[in-house]
Amino acid sequence: MKLGVLLFGPPGCGKTLIAKATAKEAGCRFINLQPSTLTDKWYGESQKLAAAVFSLAVKLQPAIVFIDEIDSFLRNRSSSDHEATAMMKAQFMSLWDGLDTDFSCQVIVMGATNRPQDLDSAILRRMPTRFHIGQPNTDQRKSILNLILRNEEVDRYLDLNEIARETEGFSGSDLKELCRDAAMFCVRDYVHGSNEEESNGDRLRPIKQQDLKRAIVKMRKSKGVSDLSEFQDNLNVD
């Protein structure tokens, strides 16, 4: 079985986690391939390292060879590419095609990227199965918040439905940072001795609705400069 799978979408939406979960559920060995692993200062060594990766995957099959930020490694080829880099890419694709020779081979090459338009057309041809991993909807954001806060002490009046509605446009990574910021408000109150009437000995107070709302405001301010044009306009302000 030779299969190429591409996961693409905005950052922070769990593409890498999906790849790991897929390997676990399918009972496959997971090889997280870093592009730096294939680079070597000696001429010709990079091709040998690429061959070693596929040889290892075949021996460990069923296996998934995962390449995060695959656009940085297998981007569009051009005449300006360094000879060693071009040869490494060609060797990688040749070995990838070589998996077809053994019909019992159970190796999947999976990649994740935020910029699928930068991938080489030859790579896209080898990845016919493509999944767009988008921003979570309201119900999904509530489930993510429940998962993040399940081991935390939270106020019994906490309304995650409201928080999920107010976090439109937040990725899973943003929600994790949101909960971390909310927890930090509890720590700051404990350190500065505020809300003493709510404290319970040496324990931190539970995370409240207001903590999450304050964290939302903070994150929206940090995400305020949302595009390059706005960023450039801010730079031009005296």
Image (cartoon, rainbow, N blue to C red):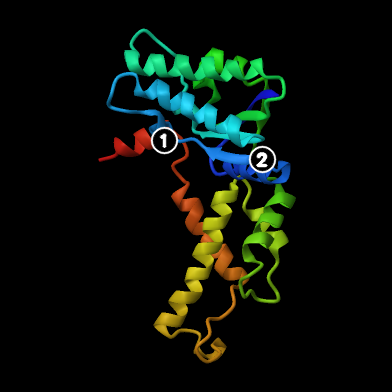
Gap between marks 1 and 2, in whole Å? 45 Å
- Can you name the residue that lies furthest to the right here? 139
Which image quarter holds the N terminus?
top right
Residue found at x 54% / y 91%: 197
Front-most of 116 and 102?
A: 102
Front-most of 73 and 58?
A: 58
Tell me which label, 1 or 2, sits earlier in the chain: 2
SS under mark 1: helix
Q: Is residue 218 visible?
A: yes
Q: In the rendered image, which quarter is residue 59 located in? A: top right
Circle 1 or circle 2, nearest the eye: 2
**In the picture shown, does residue 69 fall above or below 12?**
above
Which image quarter holds the C terminus?
top left
SS under mark 2: loop
Which residue was labeled with disc 2? 28
| 21 to the left or right of 74 | right
Asked whether the beta carbons under mark 1 and mark 2 sit within 8 Å of each other, the answer is no
Residue 230 circle label: 1
Q: Position of residue 113 (x, y in %)?
A: 53, 31
**Amino acid of disc 1:** Glu
Q: In the rendered image, which quarter is residue 88 located in? A: top left
Q: Residues within 10 Å of mark 1 (few under 14, many from 20)?
A: few
Report the number of discs. 2
Front-most of 47 and 174?
A: 47
Q: Position of residue 63 (x, y in %)?
A: 63, 35
Residue found at x 40% / y 14%: 87
| 128 to the left or right of 95 | right
